[in-house]
Amino acid sequence: MKKVDVQGTKTWIVSPLPADSELADCTKAVAAIHGGKEALCPQTLGELTRSREVTERGCISSNDSVKAAGKMSYGDIAIELLFDPTDAAGQKALLDAFEANTPVLIAFEAPNKPATTGKNGTIVYTKAMITGDGIAFPANDVIGYNVTLSPYGGFNRCPAA
């Protein structure tokens, strides 16, 4: 079994959204992602989750039942970055997209680049709306920039290359 450490994972923001045809092809998707803005110094990247609502129907005449799985839904993603007022790329892209109510492509690139090619690590990406942002001022700590994203359209994965 091979493990991939989270240390070194990069967070990319792409806005405006690339065409769906670009996102369907890993070579084009990785190029679009690497052409985006990197959100620097993430502290937490949240969790990419999806689920299905299940309905169970039971019979009155017996203990038999059936289950039906509904549509897939995606959980919100919470990201915490160190606040950097000079970050004119990643944090600004998130802030601008939130204020303009425009979707972004959010991508997480693992640090597992192959030594032979070194092009990219495994990349997981999704379209998302930014549904909230905030600046945290915790006692005895550093200022943080927190963003909540609501993904849609599925999670896509491109292998390390």
Image (cartoon, rainbow, N blue to C red):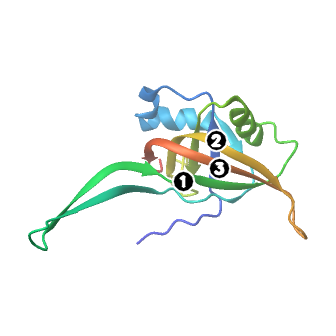
Question: Foreground residue, 25 or 127?
Answer: 127
Which of the labelled discs sits on residue 148, or is there none?
Answer: 3
| Depth check, front residue: 151 or 32 | 151
Q: Would you say residue 98 is visible in this rendering? A: yes
Residue tagged 2: 130
Residue drawn at the location 40% of the way across and 57% of the way down: 51
How many neighbours does mark 1 have within 10 angstroms: few (below 14), some (14-19), or many (20 or more)? some
Image coordinates for residue 145, horizontal then vertical, percent: 78, 52
Could you tell which of marks 1 and 2 lies nearer the N-terminus? 1
Q: Position of residue 83 (x, y in %)?
A: 83, 51
Residue sitting at the far right: 140
Q: Of discs 1 and 2, which sits in the foreground?
A: 2
Q: Judge whether 45 appears above or below 124 on screen.
A: below
Instruction: Give the Cα distance between marks 1 and 2.
Output: 29 Å
Quarter of the image for residue 52 reads: bottom left
Q: Amino acid at mark 2?
A: Ile
- Would you name the residue on which mark 1 appears? 113
Residue 69, given in percent of the width and then of the height, sits at: 27, 55
Q: Using the image, determine if residue 93 lies above or below residue 159.
A: above
Q: Is residue 62 left or right of residue 49?
A: left
Amino acid type shown at disc 1 = Lys
Q: Is tag 1's residue or tag 3's residue first in the polypeptide sequence?
A: 1
Looking at the rendered image, the disc whose residue lies closer to the viewer, 1 or 3, is 3
**Residue 72 shown left or right of residue 75 in the figure:** left
